[in-house]
C-alpha cells in the first residue's frame, strides 16, 4: 500500500528541512495526474539527513538502486551524498540536493511557498519554478505536467 | 426524453471540448476546489487503485485457460 501523504507527514513531523518538488508538488498545486513518488529538495547536512533516516526508520528504507542495502547513514556517508533515492514500505522518496533549472536547496527554498497541512507547515516549490524545473527535465510526462500547471495558472488568474 | 439526451450531449461536449486542449477542465476545477492535502490523498487513492487493478490483471493472466 503506497501512502505518499504519510511519507510527507513523517518528514514534516521529523522537522526535516525540505521543499516538496516534482510530481507530488504538482499534485498539491492541483495537477490531476497521478504520481508514484515523493521528490524533495533538502539540505544535505548531516543533521538533516539523520532526521530523514529517523523519519523513515520503521519503513525499511533501502537505496532505490541497491535494494539489498538498508539505509544506515553515518557521518562519512552523509558527507559524500548529493542525492538520496530511497524505497520504503510506503513508497519511493527521492531526496535531491538541487533541482535542474532552479538550483541548489537555497535557491529552491527561495522559490517556494508555505502551505498548511493537517500535520503542519510544508514548503512546496512555487508553480513558476516547478514549470521551469519540469521544462528543464523535458521528459514526456514533464511536458504534460507543464501543460496542466499552465492551465492551473490560467484558471487562478481568472479567479 | 429528447431533453435528457440533449442535456447529456451538452455535458459530454464540454468535456470532449476540454480534452481537445489535453486538459480535462471539469476534473481540473474539481481538483482546484480541494485543499492541497485532499489532493495529495486523492493521488494516494488513485495510485493504490491503479495498483490493485494491475495486481488483478496479473492474477487473471496467471490463471490457466
Image (cartoon, grey):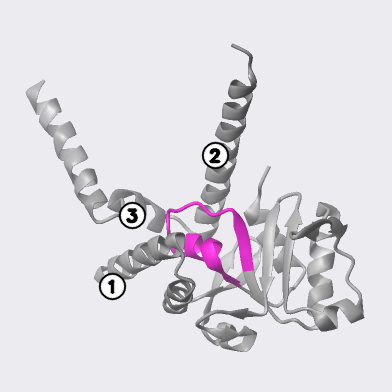
- Cα gap from disc 1 to disc 2, whole angstroms: 33 Å
Name which quarter of the figure residue B8 lies in: top left
In the visual, does A4 lie left or right of A16?
left
* Within-10-Å neighbours for mark 3: few <14, some 14–19, many 20+: some
- Read off the magenta span: A20-39
- Which residue carries the number 1 mark? A157
In the visual, does A110 lie left or right of B16?
right
Q: Residue at x 43, y 61 (%)?
A: A140
Q: Residue furthest top?
A: B65
Mark on residue B50? 2
Q: Residue A136 location in percent, x, y?
A: 46, 76
Residue A97 lies in magenta, yes or no? no
- Which residue carries the number 3 mark? B29
Q: Residue A145 location in percent, x, y?
A: 42, 62
In the visual, does B41 lie left or right of A3?
left
Q: Residue furthest front?
A: B65
Q: Nearer the viewer, residue A116 or A146?
A: A146
Does residue A131 lie above or below A4 as drawn?
A: below
Amino acid at each position: 500500500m503506497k501512502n505518499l501523504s504519510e511519507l510527507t507527514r513523517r518528514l514534516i513531523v521529523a522537522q526535516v528541512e525540505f521543499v516538496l518538488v516534482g510530481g507530488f508538488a504538482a499534485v498539491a498545486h492541483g495537477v490531476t495526474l497521478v504520481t508514484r513518488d515523493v521528490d524533495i529538495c533538502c539540505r544535505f547536512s548531516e543533521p538533516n539527513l539523520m532526521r530523514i533516516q529517523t523519519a523513515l526508520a520503521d519503513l525499511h528504507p533501502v537505496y532505490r538502486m541497491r535494494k539489498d542495502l538498508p539505509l544506515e547513514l553515518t557521518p562519512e556517508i552523509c558527507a559524500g551524498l548529493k542525492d538520496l533515492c530511497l524505497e520504503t514500505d510506503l513508497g519511493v522518496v527521492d531526496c535531491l540536493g538541487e533541482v535542474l533549472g532552479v538550483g541548489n536547496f537555497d535557491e529552491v527554498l527561495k522559490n517556494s511557498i508555505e502551505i498548511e497541512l493537517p500535520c503542519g507547515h510544508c514548503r512546496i516549490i512555487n508553480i513558476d519554478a516547478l514549470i521551469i524545473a519540469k521544462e528543464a527535465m523535458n521528459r514526456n510526462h514533464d511536458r504534460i505536467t507543464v501543460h496542466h500547471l499552465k492551465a492551473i495558472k490560467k484558471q487562478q488568474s481568472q479567479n | 426524453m429528447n431533453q435528457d439526451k440533449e442535456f447529456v450531449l451538452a455535458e459530454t461536449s464540454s468535456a470532449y471540448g476540454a480534452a481537445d486542449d489535453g486538459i480535462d477542465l471539469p476534473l481540473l476545477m474539481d481538483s482546484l476546489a480541494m485543499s492541497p492535502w485532499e489532493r495529495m490523498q486523492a493521488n494516494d487513492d488513485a495510485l493504490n487503485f491503479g495498483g490493485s487493478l494491475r495486481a488483478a490483471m496479473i492474477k487473471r493472466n496467471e490463471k490457466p485457460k
